Image (tube, helix red, strand yellow):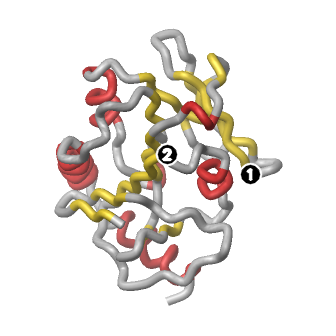
Amino acid sequence: MTKPELRKKYRALRQQLTENDIENKSIAIANRLLQLDIWQYSFYHIFLPIEEQKEINTEYILNILAGKDKNIVISKSNFENFTMSPFLLTDNTKLKKNAYNIPEPVDGIPISNQQIDVVFVPLLVFDKTGNRIGYGKGFYDRFLAECKPETIKIGLSFFDAEKEIKVAKNDVTLDYCVTPNRLFQF
């Protein structure tokens, strides 16, 4: 299947999920993350879900990170050049949904991509070798390319891996992908 066909297929599968499905699968993903040897680091970048797109509820992962006293980083998107600027999430961070319903920091403490140790990556679909497809604007590929080479990239998916995805040269592969039922290491 082509990237557009896979996007269409997985958007449709997501739309079939109930609120209860999303919560249960999101909890299962958060619990499975606890099996990974990634908790010794300091700076963790996480996405805040676009509820209208039925994305994974990352609140459970945020609770794990806060409980482990980690530095939590979220980003603000720039739709003119398709880049993301990372900010430290604090108790004082004000969030506002942008035009695409992405919850973002209004302002805050900027963080360098080079400080980030672990990135939880949103996706629509991934394959058995760690390739992923997002919404198609390349935000995360650009963002991850600016992180240090040893930054751990963890995809989060409601669904299992596809056999193979055709990728472009600027697509950044994942180190792991976590689903409700399985942990993939690439």
Circle 1 residue: 82
Quarter of the view holding residue 168: bottom right
Horizontally, residue 52 falls left or right of residue 113, namely left
Circles 1 and 2: CB atoms closer than 8 Å: no
Residue positioned 22% across, 55% down in the render: 21
Quarter of the view holding residue 107: top right
Q: Earlier in the sequence, mark 1 or mark 2?
A: 1
Horizontally, residue 137 falls left or right of residue 64, namely right
Q: Residue furthest bottom?
A: 1
| 102 is higher (above) or lower (below) than 105 | below
| 9 is higher (above) or lower (below) than 26 | below
The label shown at residue 151 is: 2
Mark 1 element type: loop
Q: Would residue 51 be visible to someone looking at this image?
A: no
Q: Position of residue 67 (x, y in %)?
A: 26, 21
Amino acid at dot 1: Phe
Q: CA distance from mark 1 to mark 2?
A: 21 Å
Residue positioned 44% across, 78% down in the render: 9
| 19 is higher (above) or lower (below) than 125 | above
Residue positioned 68% across, 35% down in the render: 85
